[in-house]
Structures are given as C-alpha cells and as structure tokens.
Amino acid sequence: MDLFAVFSDFLGSPIFRLLANLFFLFLMMLWVSLVYWTYRDAKKRGAFAFYWAVVVLFFNVFGWIIYLIVRPPEFLDEVKDRELDIKTKEALLGTTSTVCPACFKPIEGDFLICPYCMKKLKKPCPSCGRPLKMGWTVCPYCRTSL
C-alpha cells in the first residue's frame, strides 16, 4: 500500500473538495464578519467607520489588528455619560446650600431655626443680632462676649 497514492486519492475525492469548499466559505464569512464588526465598532467609537471597514476589507486580519491597536478606547455613549457625570458633580460641588442636620431639608446659612422641624441651628448675637454658631463664645462680627 502506497501512502502517496492514498493521500493523492483523498485529495481528489469529493469529500476533500467539500471540506475545502466549506473551509473557504468559513474564511469568507469570517472576513465579511470582521468587516461588519469593524464598521459597527468604529461607528460606536466615533472613528471613521467606512475607512476602517475598507481597510479590513482589503487587508483582512492585518487591517483588523491595526484597527484594534489604534481604535478609540471608549464608546461615544460612555464619553457622553462620563462628561454628564462630571458636570453633575461640578454642579453639586458648586452649590453652597446647606441642609438641616436634623431633617436634611435645604436651609439658608443665616437661619436661626429650621423652618421645617424647628431645630435650633444658631443663636443671635445679643449686640448685633447676627447668627452665631451654637458653640461660639464671642461674636466675630462685633467682638461681644456671650
């Protein structure tokens, strides 16, 4: 039995041709899938989607690897969400409104009592009438001892 004859008979058989055709069909579907995936991914990331799809179409896996190396690191939606979070946190940090320590409702800085829960927040200076923190023993505005 000649090994070369068996091998050449297998290469000429319809089963081998079917397997080879299925393999090439798989490679073509993989190629088309890479082009489609690259187009969608580049579009989501704000890159030039059509350009990168053409690069992958002509250079196949090598073009896809180049795209993976140079693609933007974030999706556009993630960038917009992050920017919105930053703006929200900046707005929260910029507000100087205080809240009542008892009921956590918003109050002004010069309130003597909370209008919601009636908790005593500050005491008035007997001399100038300005609001003072509860632990202060001297008015910082008029230097009156309490």
Image (tube, rainbow, N blue to C red):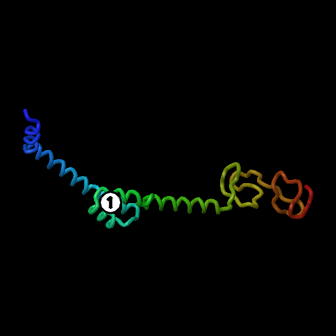
The residue where tag 1 is placed is 63
As helix, strand or loop, the secondary structure at mark 1 comes to: helix
Q: Amino acid at mark 1?
A: Gly
Q: Residues within 10 Å of mark 1 (few under 14, many from 20)?
A: many
Is 12 on the left-hand or right-hand side of 95?
A: left
**What is the x, y in percent for residue 33?**
27, 55
Residue sitting at x 71%, y 56%: 115
Q: Describe residue 103's horizontal placement relative to residue 43 as left or right.
A: right
Query: How many callouts does the rendering have?
Result: 1
Q: Would residue 116 appear left or right of 120 to someone viewing this image?
A: left
Residue drawn at point x = 11 percent, y = 36 percent: 3
Residue 132 position, x and y percent, is 82, 57
Viewer-closest of 118 and 16: 16
Residue 105 percent location from the top left of the image: 66, 54
Side (left or right) of 6 relative to 145 = left
The C terminus, quarter of image: bottom right
Name the image quarter holding residue 133. Answer: bottom right
Residue, far right: 145
Q: Quadrant of residue 113?
A: bottom right
Image-quadrant location for residue 93: bottom right
Query: Could you say where residue 140 lies in the image, as x and y percent from the top left?
Result: 86, 61
Q: Nearer the viewer, residue 83 or 109?
A: 83
The N terminus: image quadrant: top left
